[in-house]
Amino acid sequence: MKGDDLRDLYQEVILEHARKPRNYRVIETPEARHGQGFNRLCGDRLNIYLDVVDGVVRDASFQGSGCAISTASASMMTQAVKGSSVAEAEALFHRFHALVTGREANGGADVDLGKLAVFGGVRDFPARVKCASLAWHTLQAALASPTSEIVSTEE
Amino acid sequence: MNRPLSTPGAPSDAGYDVAAVRADFPALHQQVHGKPLVYLDNAATTQKPRTVIDALVRYYSHDNSNVHRGVHQLSERATEQYEAARQTVRRFLHAASEREIVFVRGTTEAINLVAQSFVRPRLQRGDEVLITALEHHSNIVPWQLACEAAGAALRVVPIDDAGQVQLDAYEHLLGPRTRIAALSYLSNALGTINPVAAMIRTAHARGVPVLLDGAQAVPHLPVDVQALDCDFFAFSGHKLYGPTGVGVLYGKRALLEAMPPWQGGGDMISEVTFERSLWNRIPYKFEAGTPEIAGAIGLAAALDYVSNLGLDAIAAHENDVLEYATAALRSIPRLRILGTAAAKASVISFVLDGIHPHDIGTVLDREGIAVRTGHHCAQPVMDRYGVPATARASIGLYNTRADVDALIAGLHTVLGVLG
C-alpha cells in the first residue's frame, strides 16, 4: 500500500466505520436532545441525537453526509459516549480534541481514549482536523442545549 | 514587461512551447510531500509567471509612491505605470475607452459595486434581478442584498442535467420587471461556457442590461466587451496569472457616468467642502482611497504574458488537455463527471461513488496533486446534482497531458486506499 502516513490516517477501523456507520438513525423520543453541525469548508452537515436521563447518556446517534473521517468519528463517538455521564463525555471531548490537534489537553488528560486512539493520525493532516472534530463539537452543542443550535467547526 | 517567450524552443501543437512556459512559473517547480507538484487548481487561483513577480518587486524596489498626488518623480512614475496598466486592461477587453476600466479588489467587489450603485437605486418593490443556477456565490449574494433592501425578487434560470442554462426558461424569465441580468460567462463549478452573446442580445431586446461575471472566462477565452455588447464585465487578476487583491470592473461609459459613487474617500472627488463634494470623473469616481497600485501593475504584466502567448493558442492547448483528461477520467471505475455541456473549458468536476471528495483531496495531496474539493462557492450547483461537494481539476495554460496522467495514477491510489 502506498503512503504509510495515509495508512496512519485511514486506519482500517476508520474505513470500516465509514462504510458501515453505527447508530446511524434518529432518536425520536420527545426529550431527545439534538445538535446540528456544519463544516463550512465542505458544506457537510451532521445531526447528533442524544437521550440523556439523570446526567447519563443512555443513547446516542447521528445522521448526515460527510467524508470517511467525519463519518467514522461520528460513528465511533456515539459508541464511546453511550452509557457515560455527561461529565465523562465532556472529558472525552477534550481528550479527543487534544489527540487530533496535537495540543495539550484542556482537562481529561487521564481519560482512556480506547478505540478512539485510531484518530491519532489526523494530527499530521491539519486540513482534516475539522472533519474529525465536527461530531464532537456537535455533541457539545447537543449536550449544552435541548433546543437545536447549528455549530460549525470554525474556531 | 513585453518580454517574449523566454525560450524559443520547438512550438507544440498548441502553438507555444509548454515546457518553456512552465519554466516561467517558479512555483510549479517544487516538491509536495516528496512528490513533484501537479497543480490542477487553477479555477481557484493561478500560479504567477516570473514577469508578474518581477513587476511587483520592481515597483516596490524603485517606483513605490502614491498615485495622482505628488509632483515628485516617484509619484509620477507610479501614476504613469498605474494608468498604463489601465490601458493594458482596456486593450485586453477591447473596451472603447480607458475611462470604462475601474480597478477594484476583484470580481466580488466589482459585482457589489454594480449591485449597490447601478441596480439598487433603480430597484423598486416587485422588481426582479435575473441570474442563472450556475452562479458562484459572489454573483448571488450581492443581488440578494440589493433585492432584500428593495423588496425585489431574485429569479434563477435553471440548468439541465448537462449543466447548461435552459435558454427557453431564460427568455421566459426576462420580464418587464427585470432590472438586470447577471450571468456567469464560464461556470467555476462545472466549466460550462454560457452562450452569453446571444443571451445579451435577448436581454437587450427587452431593454434589460447585462453584467457578465468573467472571473473564470478571462484566462480561457478572448473577450471583446464591445462585440459582446455587455453593459458590465467583472474579473479578478489572480485567476489570470496576476496578483491577488486586484480586479476590474468594465462598465459602459454612459452607465458609469450616471451612477452615483459607491464608496467615499480620497481620489474619488474633485472638490470637497464640509457642505458638499463634487465627484471626480470616471473611473476615479469609483476608486476611493489609495488603490492597489502594485497589483494593477502586476495585472498588466500578467495580461501582457497571456497576450504574448495568445488566448486562442492557450484555449487550443487547454482544450487538448481537457479532452484528454475527460476521456482518461471516464476510464476510472465509479467516477462520474458533473457538467457535460457541449461548450466547456478548463474545469472537470467529478465524484467517486462511495468516496467523499475530501478524502480524494487528501490522498491526491499526498501524491503532490493539488485539486479543489468542496462546494466551490456554488452550493446551488451542488444541490442541483444532489451532492454536498465534488472534486475539481481545473486546467491552466501550463498544464500538460503528463499532469493528467499523474491525476489518473493518483485516483487509482485513492481507490486503493479508500476502496
Image: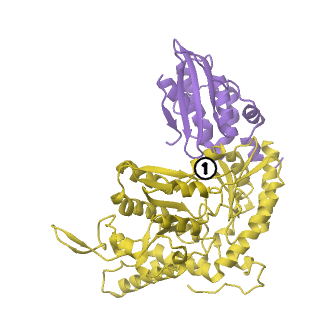
Chain for disc number 1: B
Q: Position of residue B139 (x, y in %)?
A: 50, 57
Q: Report whether B392 appears left or right of B227.
A: right
In which quadrant of the rendered image does the C terminus of chain B lie? top right
Q: How many marks?
A: 1
Residue at x-position 51% and y-position 73%: B229
- Quadrant in the picture for residue A89: top right
**Camera-side residue: B206 or B132?**
B206
Chain identifier of the purple chain? A
In this view, B204 is above or below A22: below
Residue at x-position 30% and y-position 82%: B70
Q: Report whether A10 appears left or right of B159.
A: right
Classed neighbour count for the residue bearing mark 1: other residues with Cα under 10 Å, few (<14), some (14–19), many (≥20): many
Q: Report whether B394 appears left or right of B208.
A: right
**Camera-side residue: B48 or B324?**
B324
In this view, A31 is above or below B192: above
Q: What SS does tag 1 mark?
A: helix
Q: Colour of chain B?
A: yellow
Q: Report whether B89 appears left or right of B376.
A: left
- Quadrant in the picture for residue A105: top right
* Scheme of image coloration: by chain
Q: Position of residue B416 (x, y in %)?
A: 82, 46
Circle 1 residue: B381
